[in-house]
Amino acid sequence: MICYKCQGPIPDGEPHFNGHDKSVCKPCFNESKRCFVCRFPGLDLRPVEGLGLECEFCRGRLVAEGGDLNALLPPLRAFLTPYGIKPPEPFRFAWRDLKDLRAMQTEADLPLPEFIDDYLRYAYPVFYREGRYHLLRRMTRQTFVVYLISQMAVADLAGRYGLKDLSSRNPFHTFTRGWCHWLGFEAAARLGYDQERRQLRKWPELGAMGEFERWQRMAEVNPPGKVLEFFRASLGPLARKYLEPEPPD
């Protein structure tokens, strides 16, 4: 086995890193700069403004600024239709660097992430607010799909109730935010996106996923129709209690 980075031999049994059908020896992996998206220590790493380094394998293969995102939307709409989710049209996208996009979602004092999975611990790479989907400048197609599905549900519910987003901490927001997160998790499971499913199961932290665990536990013992029935039955009472202003005396 030959190291892609230094072209030296990797002895049998020695720890190494695999990616893109290439192998990199442990010293090269530990000592080299790596791609923001895939962590691969490529030979041709180039900086992406407001993000990090991008390797030769990710370059041109990612969902990125300048691409035609509308072509990816029809199957996402089809997935959400049985759940009664109809996000507002037209879709408006805004590309953000990682610092600005995370700042939209949390005020926690956090170090700047070096890799996308560090970023995902505390923030979404797709975030809906005030009529726009704010997007991280680079992500895989799988990441884009499952997180956009979640935020399309956010857009639908926020529009229905006259909200700019679902980021508040009141019970209506945490209830609905958990449901939207669960829809992304469910999509990842159905599509076989195991990495994204694992990420959505545990991240983002700091309460950003709302009451996701409620929906995850419910879906383990109930069919999707039953889960949807409970969500719809609970939505109105929560909205009346936590969103509608109290009548004057």
Image (tube, grey):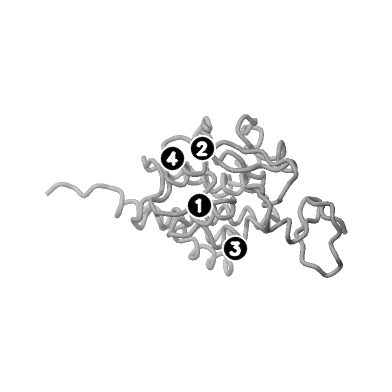
Q: Earlier in the sequence, mark 1 or mark 2?
A: 2
**Is label 3 in contact with label 2 (beta carbons under 8 Å)?**
no
Write down the quadrant of residue 221 in the picture: bottom right
Q: Nearer the viewer, mark 3 or mark 1?
A: 1
- Dot 2 amino acid type: Arg
- Dot 4 amino acid type: Arg
Q: How far is the residue under mark 1 from the one under mark 4?
A: 14 Å
Q: Earlier in the sequence, mark 3 or mark 4?
A: 4
Q: Earlier in the sequence, mark 3 or mark 2?
A: 2
Q: Return the residue at label 4.
A: 129
Q: How far is the residue under mark 3 from the one under mark 2?
A: 37 Å
Classify mark 1: residues with Cα within 10 Å, few (<14), some (14-19) or many (20+).
many
Please tell me whether mark 4 sits on a helix, a strand or a loop. strand
Q: Nearer the viewer, mark 4 or mark 2?
A: 2
Classify mark 4: residues with Cα within 10 Å, few (<14), some (14-19) or many (20+).
some
Q: Return the residue at label 3.
A: 223
Viewer-proximal residue, 5 or 143? Answer: 5
Q: Is residue 184 above or below residue 78?
A: below
Q: Earlier in the sequence, mark 4 or mark 2?
A: 2
**How many marks do you count on the picture?**
4
What numbered label is drawn on residue 180? 1
Please tell me whether mark 2 sits on a helix, a strand or a loop. strand
Viewer-proximal residue, 153 or 199? Answer: 199
Q: How far is the residue under mark 1 from the one under mark 2?
A: 22 Å
What numbered label is drawn on residue 96? 2
- Position of 41 with respect to 137 (left or right) is right
| Residue 105 at x, y percent in the picture | 43, 48
Residue ID at (64%, 54%): 188
Q: Earlier in the sequence, mark 1 or mark 4?
A: 4
Write down the quadrant of residue 16 in the picture: bottom right
Please tell me whether mark 1 sits on a helix, a strand or a loop. helix
